[in-house]
Image: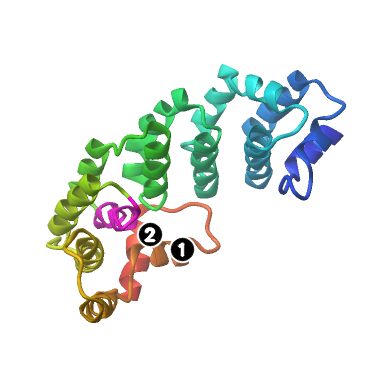
Amino acid sequence: MNNLKENICTYLAHEITPVESIINGYSLEEVFVEIESILQNSCPEEISHTLGFIRDAGLYEHPFHDAFRKHIKTPSLWGTLKVLLTSSDFFIRRNTVYTIAKLCERNRAHLLAEAFPFYLENDPINLPNLIKELTWLTNDRNWSFIEQITKAKHFAQRWSLCELLDDDGSSIESKYRYLDILKHLSSDPEPLVSAEAALRFERIKIKTGPKLPKPEWRKEIKRISSLEPRITFQKTAMQFMHGKDCYTLDEFERFVRTLT
C-alpha cells in the first residue's frame, strides 16, 4: 500500500491528523484518483476512513481547502458516492448519506432523493437520517416522502417516522403537520408504532398549545414522560445492529418480536 493510500485509509480526524499533512506532496489529481480507487475497491473500514477524510478536507480550513472544494465537484466522485448509497454494508450507506450532506453541494441533493425508494424498501433504520439530511440540503420537508412512509406496508417502515417526527425546532406549520401524521400513526395496528407515535404526539402538542402555569406544565411533562414505551425505534435499531453490517426487514422483525 502506498503512503498516500495508507494515510487516507487510516485517517481519523482533522484534529489528530491535519488534512494538509496527507495532501502535502501530492497533486490533488493524484489525491482524488486515490480516493476514488479506495471508495470503489477497498474494505468497509477503509471506505469509512476515506469518507471521513473527504468530509474534513471539504469542511476544515487548510492551505488546500479551496482547491479541494473545486475537485469535489468532479462528476466521477459523485457517481461513486451514488453507488455507495446502496452498498450492501449498512454503515457505508449511513456514512455516505452523511458525507453527501456535509459536503454542502446542494445541487447533489437529488442523489439522496433518488435513493429514497431503496431506503424505504430495504433500510428503514437509515431512512430517518436520509430524510433529515435531504431536508437540510434542500430546505424542504419532503412531505411526499414522509407520506409514503406513513402508508408503507411494513411496520418497521412506519415506525421509523417516530425517530423523524419530534419537537425538533421546526416551524409551527411543520409541527402541526407532524401532529396530523402522529395522530394517524397513534392508531396504527402495530402497538409499537402506535405507542411511540402517541408519545411524540404529546411532546409536540404541549409545545404548540397555550402556555401553561408552571405547576400544570410540570404535571404535563411528568405525564408525557410516563408515556415513553419500553421499546422505541431508535433504541431497538441500535441494539439490533450491534455487531452487524447488514440486515433484512425479516431479520429486524424477528429481533423485535423477541423483545415483545
Residue 242 magenta: no
- Please state if 164 lies on the left or on the right of 61 as rendered: left
Disc 2/disc 1 C-alpha distance (Å): 14 Å
Q: Residue placed at 34% from the left, 63% from the top? A: 233
Residue 57 on image: x %, y %: 68, 34
> Which of the numbered marks, if any, corresponds to residue 214?
none
Check disc 1 and give the amino acid type. Met
Residue 161 on image: x %, y %: 28, 53
> Which of the numbered marks, if any, corresponds to residue 251?
2
The residue identified by callout 1 is 238
Q: Residue placed at 36% from the left, 34% from the top? A: 139
**Magenta residues?**
155-169
Q: Residue placed at 48% from the left, 36% from the top? A: 85
Q: Which of marks 2 and 1 is nearer the N terminus?
A: 1
Residue 173 on image: x %, y %: 21, 45
Check disc 2 and give the amino acid type. Glu
Residue 164 magenta: yes
Image quadrant assignment for residue 160: bottom left
Secondary structure mainly formed by the magenta segment? helix
